[in-house]
Image (spheres, helix red, strand yellow):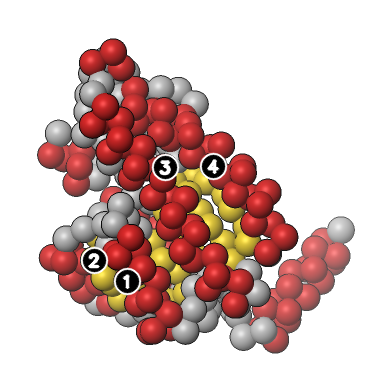
């Protein structure tokens, strides 16, 4: 059993080396876009992707946040660039995709991490404006961002989409009804996209992290 295990590990190492990928850099030559990635969970994801060898394009609604994140990650010797992107704006989504294609020749990975939560209180007190904002950014923009990258992934033979949902999809946070609903919707979206995009060799999965100490939390 031990010999078989060693042989299997050795064979995997040979296969990875023959394709130019090492165990240390499993994402070598891959290009990743991460939305809302200049702080918190998104920043940590961007860093890990770059540490694993990917060329990463980070984004945020504010240029100063992009500049700070890019400088911090480049100081670690990582291949990271960035651009401003408000995922709710079509022109910003297009610019994010165009930046990756121009700098790195394509896109292999999308991490859709952007989300908003402008409301705390009862569902019965939630205004139509709040519903529109949360669903537009947390759900609709995720679909549209995925739609924007799929053609580029197909050109490279496939890719991977990762959607950041939340434990709130399984155990709702009190007072955050619209946010909880939007994160629950992302579970259904992930399942549907996974079925639809599988024939194109594009995998779709979601994360359901717990509460993190992000800049938004620190302001609360």
How far from the left and from the top, in percent, is residue 3? 84, 66
Q: CA distance from mark 1 to mark 4?
A: 24 Å
Judging depth in this view, the residue of 167 and 16 nearest the camera is 167
Whether residue 91 is visible:
yes
Give the residue displayed 41% in from the left and 66% down from the top.
33
- Tag 1's secondary structure? helix
Q: Earlier in the sequence, mark 1 or mark 4?
A: 1
Instruction: Check disc 1: other Cα within 10 Å, few if <14, some if 14-19, many if 20+.
Output: some
Q: CA distance from mark 1 to mark 2?
A: 8 Å
- Tag 3's secondary structure? helix
Left or right of 136, for residue 144? right
Q: Earlier in the sequence, mark 2 or mark 3?
A: 2
Q: Which residue is mark 1?
A: 95
Q: Is residue 74 above or below residue 109?
A: below
Q: Earlier in the sequence, mark 2 or mark 4?
A: 2
Tell me the quarter of the image containing the C terminus.
Answer: top left
Q: Earlier in the sequence, mark 1 or mark 3?
A: 1
Judging depth in this view, the residue of 29 and 10 nearest the camera is 29
Q: Which residue is mark 4?
A: 189
Q: CA distance from mark 3 to mark 4?
A: 8 Å
Tags 1 and 2 touching, CB below 8 Å? yes
Q: Which residue is mark 2?
A: 84
Tags 3 and 4 touching, CB below 8 Å? yes
- Tag 4's secondary structure? helix
Q: Which residue is mark 3?
A: 139
For residue 119, what is the image quadrant?
Answer: top left
């Amino acid at each position: 059993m031990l010999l078989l295990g060693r042989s299997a590990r050795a064979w995997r190492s040979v296969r990875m080396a023959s394709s130019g990928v090492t165990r240390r850099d499993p994402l070598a030559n891959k290009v990743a876009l991460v939305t809302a990635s200049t702080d918190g969970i998104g920043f940590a994801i961007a860093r890990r992707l770059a540490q694993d060898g990917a060329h990463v394009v980070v984004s945020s609604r504010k240029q100063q946040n992009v500049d700070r994140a890019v400088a911090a990650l480049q100081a670690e010797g990582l291949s990271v660039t960035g651009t401003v992107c408000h995922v709710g704006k079509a022109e910003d989504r297009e610019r994010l995709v165009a930046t990756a294609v121009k700098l790195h020749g394509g896109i292999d990975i999308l991490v859709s991490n952007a989300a908003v939560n402008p409301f705390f209180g009862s569902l019965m007190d939630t205004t139509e404006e709040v519903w529109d904002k949360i669903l537009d950014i947390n759900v609709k923009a995720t679909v549209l961002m995925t739609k924007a990258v799929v053609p580029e992934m197909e050109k490279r033979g496939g890719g991977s989409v990762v959607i950041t949902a939340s434990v709130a999809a399984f155990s709702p946070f009190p007072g955050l009804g619209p946010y909880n609903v939007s994160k629950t919707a992302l579970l259904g979206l992930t399942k549907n996209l996974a079925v639809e995009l599988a024939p194109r060799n594009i995998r779709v999965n979601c994360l359901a992290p717990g509460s993190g100490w992000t800049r938004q939390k620190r302001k609360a």
